[in-house]
Each structure stands twice: as C-alpha cells, then as structure tokens.
Image (spheres, rainbow, N blue to C red):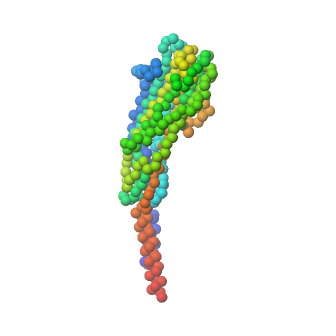
Amino acid sequence: MRVLLLCVSLVLLLVSQASASTISVGIQSNGSSCQQGFNDGAVADGVCSSNGSGTYDDWGATSSASGGTSSNLVGIGSTSTGLAIDAAVAADDGGADVGQGGDRWIKRNVSYSILLTVDVDSPAQSWTIDLTQSALGLYALRGDGSATAVGTQNNGVGRLSDISVSVNGNPYNVDVTANSYANNPSNNGSASQQFSGSRGDLGVLAGTGDASFGVTVSFSLEALSRDGCTGSICSSASGGEEAATLFGAENVTDQGVDDYSTWGRSIGPDGYNATWKLNVTNIPEPTTLALLGVGLVGLAVGGRRRASR
C-alpha cells in the first residue's frame, strides 16, 4: 500500500510541475521616418506633421506596433501570439494655394524590428512555427472645392507599398493589391479605394529547445493633395482635396478625411496583422516521467495482487 501511495504522489507531483510552452513577439526598435514636400516625391526639410490655417496646408503621418505573449500550452499542441502595425498618412492642399505651387505630399516609411522568442518545457522538445499575415486599408479622398476631379487611380493620391517581411533573414513578403474604387464625381464629394493582401506559410521556423529570432516588417504609405491633376483621387484645378491612406490609424490632421467614421468603416480590421503559431511536436519530458509513474503504479498494484493470493 505504501508503494502505491508513493507512486500516485509521484505522478501528481510531476504533472503539477509541468510548465507552459510560450511564444512571444516584442518590438525591439522603431526605424520609421517621414518625408514631406510640395510635389509628388519632392522631399522638403521640416517636421513630419504640420497644421496650417485649418482649411489648407495640413499633412501628417503616424504609425505604431504592438506584440504579445501566449503561455497557455502545456505538453504537446499549439499556441499563438499576434503582431499588429497600424499607420496613416493624410494631406490637404487648400484652394488658397492655387497658382502658388501648393501641392502637398507626404510619405511615411514604416519599419519595425521585432524579437520572436520561443520558450518550451524541455531542452529536448522540438517545435515548428507557422506564420499568417494580412493587410487591409483604404485610399481615401474628400473634396472641398467645386470643380470635378477626373482621370484614373494610376495618378492617385493614396499609395501603400508591398509589405516587406524578413524572418531570421528569409523573406515572407505580402503583396498589396488595390480593389475597384469609387470615383469622385464632384470636387465636394468623396472617393475611396480599398487595398488588401494576405499570405500563409507553414514551418517558417523549426527548432529544439528555447530559441529567439529577428523579424523585420517595413512598408511605405503616401498621400498627395494637388492644386490640379488628372486622377480620380486627386485635386482638380480649384485645389483643396483632402487625401489619406488609412491603415488602422486616424486623426493625423484636422481635416477629417483620415477619420474612419467619414467612410463608414471601423479601425479594427484595418492595418497589418500577423499571427505566429507555435506547434510543439513531441511529448515533453515531464509528461514522459508522469507516464513512467503510471507504469510504476500498475506494477505496484499487480505485485500486491500476486502477494495476496
């Protein structure tokens, strides 16, 4: 009987001491920067955001990133953690700048360095990691003039570059594609064009025991507001159209074009989102020892039955 109680106690002790396998994503550094100018692609000196009179010459940009830790996996199985990056740019060239070369252009270069950490139960425990990525956002324009904006989106105001992702030095980039857009029939109307991209990859990383890896994510957002141009989402000759690229963030200027409520959208689904799934593929050492304890219990019970005959 004493042997039986000892074995049961051993099993309970081993099970209670089993620790959790975790995967975490932490933001190491923010290498983002801004460029601004008075023509498409022309860089000007100065700060990354500015507010003018409240009716024109407003532009701004913002971005942020957040990661997390998951620690709910004991033994074999899967658990996951997420990474999110939100950003926005907006620009407005008011009609008062007509004839003064008053185009407003801004570009936000978004770049984050991330540390991916795996902490498993046992040094002998093997695992793999799957990566799922998605991007969703909106090119947006709201006119505040009286003339008509014409042309095609190819000359458009809002742009997002494809998302460059490097995991431990290997590329897992996300291609971003624009969907059909709503034209701006008059300069006091609005126009928008959704863009999106996604990909999923199995086994982007694999290893045994604890490990850490470097990840980088980078892309660029642009907004251009002009006195006059040929583009469905750009200003007419009367000037003054407000342009933005919305990617999970808003309120970078006081003009309102970057406010999601203007477009009947919610911030939540937009932005860059990645899910890192940790798959533990073998039985961790504490569980193996617990099974051994169960075997000892069986042997003890069998021995007592034979002794009692």
Question: How many numbered badges does the structure rendering display?
Answer: 0
Q: Position of residue 217 (x, y in %)?
A: 43, 38
Compared with 16, 217 (above or below) is above
Q: Residue at x 57, y 14 (%)?
A: 238
Q: Is residue 91 visible?
A: no
Q: Position of residue 272 (x, y in %)?
A: 49, 38
Kindly indicate the quadrant of the structure image that contains residue 121. Answer: bottom left
Instruction: Tell me the quarter of the picture where residue 20 sits.
Output: bottom left
Image point 42% across, 44% down: which residue?
Answer: 26
Q: Please tell me which residue lies in front, 130 or 146.
A: 130
As drawn, the residue found furthest toward the bottom would be 309
- Observer able to see residue 282: yes
Residue 303 point in image, percent of width and height: 44, 82
Q: Is residue 38 above or below residue 167?
A: above
> Residue at the location (48% across, 27% down)?
222
Q: Position of residue 185 (x, y in %)?
A: 63, 22
Residue in view at x 42 percent, y 66 percent: 288
Q: In the rendered image of this protein, does residue 152 appear above or below residue 199?
A: above
Outermost residue, top direction?
Answer: 99
